[in-house]
Image (spheres, rainbow, N blue to C red):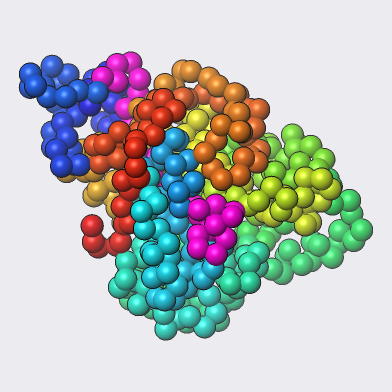
């Protein structure tokens, strides 16, 4: 691999990347290549580490009609994503027991176009399963503090967390938390009465910032008490940023992600009945979005992950436009790089920032920071080659996810993925895939 714009920890510069056995063995000046060495010439295109997306719902087995391993990992490859860590819910069974995890692993066999690891789940009553899941190779654990939307993955309260967190802390495992509390949500919904649920403002009003803010306060308090690692997924409320900044300054073991949709869209722009924008927590106002960008630049928000959560189109209730009944989830796995870059460059951020948010910090969250998320000697030869200046309009029918409904349809984005390499092998090249899937199952402490 040779290019004039290789993104590394020290900046963007010309380099030749030498690969053997799927690993990077050397990084040299452009000219330092042997005479019979096969070369991929990236030219003026950007060469960046393969993206690591730590928040993806694949749903197989059990709800493969929503999304499955083959379609999700092809979409990932087409978007320059080379590593996924899959969430433990929406599949049947959920990954909340060793038996459920083993079934998940069997379902993934032979279907992976990129490398895939797994989070386990924390639900009421499964504390006895947590160590078995850890020993079997999950990278950490996910919980919901409000209803998840599926019966197989009930939400936890403070008492459940007090049971689980000492176990997780003893193993050094991270808890990823959907940080919304039911109380403020129930209060807000009661106040809405007979509101018009085709209006986005009704959905927004039903998931107040207080639900996030109070959940984050609870998580930080328990993290301090038990010395546990906590990761806040899909932060949408900018009101919580001062609280998180203060907690980090005091040494709390907390990390934070936001998502492309919170950094791209604004509530004021969402049309009546546009249920493809429904997610929880909701997309908030333009002013809120700009504060999220500032927190990302300041390092209070560490990373960006998609929370790719697709469903069959009929579950989005497009015919009625009813936000109260539509499934809450954004499908965007293939579009994370251009979606984030399009906004990042407008906010004055660099390719280095982008690489840290999409590659380096997600790899660190999963404990893969010595193998994934950077172009450095000894790391997996995972690369995305892309053109940051070229714009395109999203044609949803050309996306590789199972169902094509996405709020990005028709939107102009900057940043076209040209090629994706997994452990030195080209798996995607200008619309064409390699002949067969070559992704691995990733297990914590193995591979």
Furthest residue toward right: 194
Picture coordinates of residue 167 (x, y %)?
Answer: 38, 78
Residue at horizontal 24 percent and vertical 23 percent from the top: 40
**How many marks can you see?**
0
Front one among 205 and 97: 97
- Percent x, y of residue 259: 54, 45
| First to last magenta residue range | 41-68
Q: Quadrant of the N terminus?
A: top left
Q: Is residue 266 visible?
A: yes
Residue drawn where x is 50% and y is 30% of the image: 338
Q: Is 83 on the left-hand or right-hand side of 297?
A: left
Q: Quadrant of residue 37?
A: top left
Residue that appears at 37% across and 73% down: 133
Residue 47 shown in magenta: yes
Question: Percent x, y for residue 304?
Answer: 48, 44
> Which residue is at the front of the view, 436 or 4?
436
Left of 92 or right of it: where is 168?
A: left
| Rendered view: 381 above or below 236 | above
Residue farthest along the front direction in this orientation: 435
Task: Give the vertical position of 96 relative to 429 (above or below).
Answer: below
Q: Quadrant of the C terminus?
A: bottom left
Q: Nearer the viewer, residue 340 or 227?
A: 340
Residue at image position (46%, 25%) is 416
Q: Is residue 15 visible?
A: no
Residue 363 lies, in percent from the top left, at 34, 49
Please say whether residue 215 is one of the residues in the magenta stretch: no
């Amino acid at each position: 691999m040779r290019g004039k714009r290789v993104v590394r920890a020290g900046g963007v510069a010309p380099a030749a990347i030498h690969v053997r056995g799927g690993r990077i063995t050397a990084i040299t000046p452009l000219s330092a290549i042997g005479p019979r060495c096969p070369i991929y010439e990236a030219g003026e295109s950007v060469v960046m580490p393969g993206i690591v997306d730590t928040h993806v719902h694949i749903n197989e087995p059990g709800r493969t009609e929503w999304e499955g391993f083959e379609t999700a990992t092809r979409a990932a490859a087409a978007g320059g994503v080379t590593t996924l860590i899959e969430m433990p819910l929406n599949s049947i069974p959920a990954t909340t027991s060793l038996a459920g995890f083993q079934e998940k692993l069997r379902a993934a066999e032979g279907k992976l176009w990129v490398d895939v690891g797994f989070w386990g789940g924390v639900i009421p009553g499964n504390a006895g399963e947590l160590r078995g899941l850890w020993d079997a190779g999950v990278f950490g654990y996910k919980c919901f503090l409000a209803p998840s939307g599926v019966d197989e993955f009930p939400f936890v309260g403070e008492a459940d967390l007090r049971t689980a967190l000492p176990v997780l802390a003893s193993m050094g495992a991270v808890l990823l938390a959907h940080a919304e509390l039911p109380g403020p949500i129930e209060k807000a919904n009661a106040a809405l009465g007979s509101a018009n649920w085709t209006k986005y403002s009704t959905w927004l009003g039903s998931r107040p910032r207080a639900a996030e803010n109070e959940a984050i306060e609870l998580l930080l308090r328990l993290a301090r008490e038990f010395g546990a690692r906590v990761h806040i997924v899909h932060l949408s409320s900018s009101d919580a940023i001062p609280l998180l900044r203060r907690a980090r300054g005091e040494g709390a073991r907390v990390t934070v992600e936001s998502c492309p949709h919170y950094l791209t869209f604004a509530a004021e722009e969402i049309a009546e009945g546009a249920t493809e924008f429904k997610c929880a927590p909701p997309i908030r106002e333009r002013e809120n979005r700009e504060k999220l960008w500032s927190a990302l630049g300041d390092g209070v928000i560490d990373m960006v992950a998609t929370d790719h959560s697709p469903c069959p189109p009929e579950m989005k209730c497009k015919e009625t436009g009813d936000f109260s009944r539509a499934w809450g989830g954004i499908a965007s796995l293939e579009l994370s790089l251009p979606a984030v870059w399009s906004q990042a460059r407008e906010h004055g951020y660099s390719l280095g920032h982008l690489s840290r948010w999409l590659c380096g910090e997600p790899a660190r969250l999963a404990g893969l920071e010595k193998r994934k998320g950077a172009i450095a000697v000894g790391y997996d030869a995972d690369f995305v080659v892309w053109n940051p200046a070229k714009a395109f309009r999203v044609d949803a029918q050309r996306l590789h996810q199972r169902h094509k409904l996405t709020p990005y349809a028709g939107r102009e984005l900057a940043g076209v993925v040209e090629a994706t390499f997994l452990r030195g092998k080209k798996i995607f090249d200008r619309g064409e895939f390699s002949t067969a899937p070559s992704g691995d199952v990733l297990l914590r402490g193995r591979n």
